[in-house]
Image (tube, grey):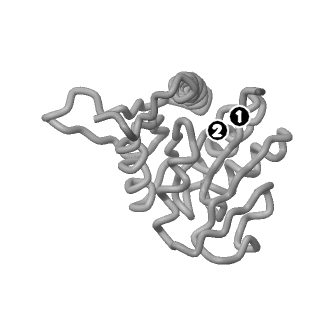
Amino acid sequence: MSERPPQVAVIGGGSAREELLELAEEVGRRLAEAGAVLVCGGRGGVMEAASRGAREAGGVVIGILPGLSPGEANEHVTHAIATGVGHARNLAVVASGDAVIAIGGEWGTLSEIALARRLGHPVAALRSWTLENAAVDDLGITESSDAAEAVAFALGAARTAASGIAEGRDPVDEP
């Protein structure tokens, strides 16, 4: 059986400042160049910029859409999944990535970070939400200073996660 490529979820706002869009595009390009599959919400803003970067580098982009039509996907998505579940699709986006990169973001991004961590998926935050909890030493969110650092972290974490699942350990089943 062949090993599947790592899947990295890229999350962020449906609209974003130009600097964040440039970071997202670079993240998408770097993921594709590394042979990873990019998973995102499939629409505009950070999602579209990351998708564009990945596609221009010859990568695969899976867009998990909130609505019922694959036609809602941005033009760079190679595989569109229409869910019809609205914001609940955020769970499918982060669950489908072996690791997550959050770029900027709005409330939906914050919910995706929380869901990813609940599932045990590591998160790289690139100019995104910074969180702390006095009761928890390590929230599993690593702040990244640039696209290269975020991608390196996510790819390393994705490979570790994929090897754990291959060995029969599923982070959802762990306490």
- 171 sits to left or right of 156: left
Q: Residue 7 has which mark?
A: 2
Secondary-structure class at tag 2: strand
Could you say where residue 97 lies in the image, as x and y percent from the top left? 57, 42
Could you say where residue 37 lies in the image, as x and y percent from the top left? 71, 40
Could you say where residue 139 lies in the image, as x and y percent from the top left? 30, 34
Q: Upstream in the sequence, badge 2 or badge 1? A: 2
- Front-lying residue, 43 or 69: 69
Would you identify the image quadrant in which residue 35 lies? top right
Q: Residue 36 has which mark?
A: 1
Secondary-structure class at tag 1: loop
- 123 sits to left or right of 76: left
> Mark 2 belongs to which amino acid?
Gln
Quadrant the N terminus occupies: top right
Question: Which residue is farthest left?
Answer: 135
- 71 sits to left or right of 43: right
